[in-house]
């Protein structure tokens, strides 16, 4: 089965894209900002280019208002999208890199 890359931690842990799967490595819930490829969804463009920078700062309802940018920084700092999620995460498997 094909796995999709988590937009927070970068590991290939998700069974689908934008279907609210929760990454077991960082506990980010993959919401609908992005389509199956990880690119911004149609219509979210700025000057003809995807507005990824802007999308990083949109509060995620699925993640209780946390932005993707904040979640990525949290993962780099302590290994989960939020400190409260540390008990729920695991180390990535070599097949997920």
Image (spheres, helix red, strand yellow):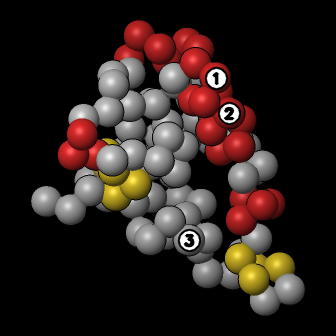
Tell me what residue is drawn at x 40 percent, y 54 percent.
5
In the image, taking residue 74 as reference, residue 34 lies left or right, namely left
What element does badge 1 sit on?
helix
> Marks 3 and 2, Cα distance to the nearest angstrom?
20 Å
What element does badge 3 sit on?
loop
> Marks 2 and 1, Cα distance to the nearest angstrom?
6 Å
Q: Earlier in the sequence, mark 1 or mark 3?
A: 3
> Marks 1 and 3, Cα distance to the nearest angstrom?
25 Å
Question: Where 49 falls versus 10 (above or below)?
Answer: below
Whether residue 64 is visible to the viewer of this picture, yes or no, is no
Residue at the disc numbered 3: 39
**Could you say which disc has been placed on residue 89 in the image?**
none
- Decide: few, some or many residues near mark 1? Use Cα within 10 Å; few <14, some 14-19, many ≥20: few
Tell me what residue is drawn at x 39 percent, y 60 percent.
17
Q: Earlier in the sequence, mark 3 or mark 2?
A: 3
Residue at the disc numbered 2: 73
In the image, taking residue 73 as reference, residue 9 lies left or right, namely left
Whether residue 70 is visible to the viewer of this picture, yes or no, is yes
């Amino acid at each position: 089965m094909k796995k999709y890359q988590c937009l927070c931690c970068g590991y290939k842990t998700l069974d689908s894209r934008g279907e609210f799967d929760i990454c077991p490595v960082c506990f980010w819930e993959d919401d609908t900002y992005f389509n199956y490829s990880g690119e911004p969804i149609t219509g979210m463009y700025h000057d003809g280019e995807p507005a990824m920078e802007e999308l990083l700062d949109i509060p995620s309802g699925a993640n209780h208002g946390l932005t993707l940018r904040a979640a990525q920084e949290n993962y780099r700092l302590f290994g989960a999208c939020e400190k409260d999620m540390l008990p729920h995460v695991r180390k990535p498997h070599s097949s997920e890199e």
